[in-house]
Image (cartoon, rainbow, N blue to C red):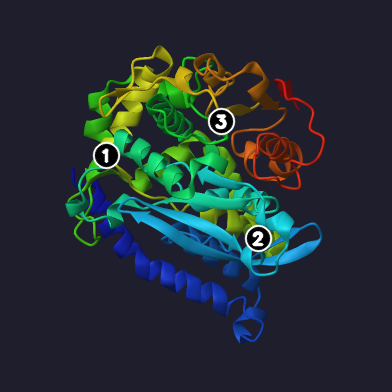
């Protein structure tokens, strides 16, 4: 149980070396430095920067979304916190034009709540998702708080609490005109939240878009799924759960530490990461600054990880991956049974990547088997050909192949009279792209 403390001691011990490496990288590469003119200065600078980036501490990145272009016009964007719980912030990306310049087509764009994963990386991993959605929607996103930054006095955070948080955010925004997009892990608690609201007779969102999520991990199990089923729950608790050290606000809290999750991410494709760092070194030596900057941007995001509350993590392993309680109809949240068949007035779109090695084919599509109360005409499935897990919500395939389908699906089921909804939309059926 001292692993976290040992990790922090090692990080503190490495800090002077990383600062020294950063300083040397600057001295041997700065145009005004005489050291940059020495023989092999470029190789020295590249080596020092590589050492610095391997050893540095990666803080939570910023979304950095300051403008959006819609219909050929560029509008400023302001990031606002509209609601906060101890473990999550609800953010709104506010287009300045929404209430100030009288452009009706922007004012009437449908609101979308993007539910980001609480599974290691920060919500900023969905930056491209948000940036693209902002063209045609009012966008909210869940920004989960690093558990090591939450005081132990705030209490535990369980999977039931996650579901309750999603319900709270949906009610706060207003379910009547809302569309919810869940990416990966949150597909399960989002489906639970909307199912419970529907069963109580509460208003539910107009549509749900579920992307690459583990609705039923018995379908095409991946290496990630197999890890969760090969070991008993006590193994995860004994080997992966640790205590937050005294140098953080959440000292004493039980968590699944981000650094352990990061080691798992790297272990999935070690050769690719080694080659990526070697290519980065070569790019610096050759002076290919564009590729070097792309490497920095990717790993600034990829290496920034957060701690997950232990109770939530263990609940997820048990409920989602080991006992499959949702697809078996046996999941109870705070004493209420989760019944997706109760959903009737919410349209459903599921999206999977053909090459997804995290959520296998069929795992997200399984939601259609559960949501039998939704008319067939209001349900659609999309398999993005050639896309991996990240490709369905980030990058070129997301922007060019997936997003147009998501935009049209939301517009087709939107009641707010957006510009997209006024167009002729072909009734949606299950399709591939």
From the top left corner, tell me how far across and down residue 211 is, in percent.
Answer: 57, 33
Q: Quadrant of the N terminus?
A: top left
Q: Nearer the viewer, residue 422 or 13?
A: 422
| Label 2, residues with CA under 10 Å away: few <14, some 14-19, many ≥20 | some
Point out residue 384 in the picture as x, y percentages from the top left corner.
70, 29
Tag 3 residue: 212
Disc with the residue nearer the chain's start (3 vs 1) = 3
Whether residue 356 appears in this view of the structure is no
**How crowded is the residue under tag 3: few (<14 C-alpha within 10 Å), some, or many (20+)?**
many
Mark pair 3, 2: CA separation? 30 Å
Residue 360 visible to an observer of this rendering:
yes
For disc 1, the neighbor class at 10 Å (few under 14, some 14 to 19, many from 20) is many
Any mark on residue 21, and which? none
Tag on residue 310? 1
**Which circle's residue, 3 or 2, is located before the other in the chain?**
3
User: Horizontal and vertical percent for residue 333?
Assistant: 30, 27
The foreground one among 168 and 241 is 168
Query: What residue is at 25 percent from the left and 34 percent from the top?
Result: 239
Percent x, y of residue 410: 66, 38
Q: Residue at x 38, y 50 (%)?
A: 306
Inter-mark Cα distance, 3 to 1 = 24 Å
Name the disc covering residue 292, or none.
2
Residue depth check, mark 3 versus mark 2: number of the one nearer the observer? 3
User: How many tags in the picture?
Assistant: 3
Q: Quadrant of the C terminus?
A: top right
Q: Residue at x 70, y 20 (%)?
A: 430
> What is the distance, in whole Å, between disc 2 and disc 1 at their CAs?
37 Å
Q: Are marks 3 and 1 in contact (CB under 8 Å)?
A: no
Q: Nearer the viewer, residue 222 or 160?
A: 160
**Mark 2: which secondary structure?**
helix
* Image quadrant in which you'd find residue 151: bottom left
Secondary structure under tag 1 reads: helix
């Amino acid at each position: 149980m001292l692993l976290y403390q040992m990790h922090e001691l090692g990080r503190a011990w490495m800090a002077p070396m990383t600062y020294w490496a950063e300083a040397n990288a600057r001295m041997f590469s700065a145009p005004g430095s005489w050291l940059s003119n020495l023989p092999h200065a470029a190789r020295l600078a590249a080596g020092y920067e590589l050492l610095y980036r391997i050893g540095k501490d990666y803080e939570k990145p910023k979304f950095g979304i300051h403008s959006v272009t819609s219909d050929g016009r560029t509008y400023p964007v302001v990031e606002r916190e509209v609601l906060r719980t101890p473990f999550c912030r609800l953010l709104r990306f506010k287009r300045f034009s929404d209430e100030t310049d009288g452009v009706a087509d922007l004012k009437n764009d449908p609101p979308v709540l993007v539910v980001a994963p609480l599974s290691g990386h920060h919500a900023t991993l969905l930056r491209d998702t948000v940036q693209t959605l902002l063209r045609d929607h009012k966008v909210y996103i869940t920004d989960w708080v690093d558990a090591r930054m939450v005081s132990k006095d705030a209490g535990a955070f369980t999977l039931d609490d996650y579901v309750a948080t999603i319900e709270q955010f949906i009610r706060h925004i207003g379910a009547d005109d809302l569309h919810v997009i869940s990416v990966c892990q949150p597909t399960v608690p989002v489906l639970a939240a909307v199912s419970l609201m529907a069963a109580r007779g509460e208003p539910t969102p107009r549509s749900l878009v579920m992307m690459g999520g583990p609705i039923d991990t018995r379908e095409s199990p991946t290496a990630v799924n197999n890890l969760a089923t090969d070991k008993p729950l006590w193994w995860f608790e004994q080997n992966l759960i640790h205590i937050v050290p005294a140098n953080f606000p959440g000292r004493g809290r039980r968590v699944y530490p981000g650094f352990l999750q990061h080691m798992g991410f790297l272990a999935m494709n070690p050769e690719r990461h080694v080659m990526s760092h070697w290519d980065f070194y070569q790019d610096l030596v050759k002076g290919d600054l564009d590729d070097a900057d792309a490497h920095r941007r990717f790993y600034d995001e990829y290496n920034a990880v957060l701690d997950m509350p232990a109770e939530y993590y263990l609940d997820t392993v048990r409920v989602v991956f080991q006992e499959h309680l949702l697809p078996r109809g046996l999941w109870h949240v705070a004493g209420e049974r989760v019944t997706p068949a109760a959903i009737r007035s919410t349209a459903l779109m599921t999206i999977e990547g053909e090459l997804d090695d995290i959520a296998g084919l069929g795992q997200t599509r399984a939601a259609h088997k559960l949501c039998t109360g939704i008319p067939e005409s209001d349900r659609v499935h999309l398999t993005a050909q050639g896309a991996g897990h990240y490709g369905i919500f980030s990058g070129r395939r997301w922007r060019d192949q997936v997003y147009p389908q998501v935009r049209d699906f939301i517009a087709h089921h939107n009641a707010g009279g957006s510009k997209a909804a006024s167009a002729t939309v072909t009734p949606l059926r299950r399709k591939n792209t």
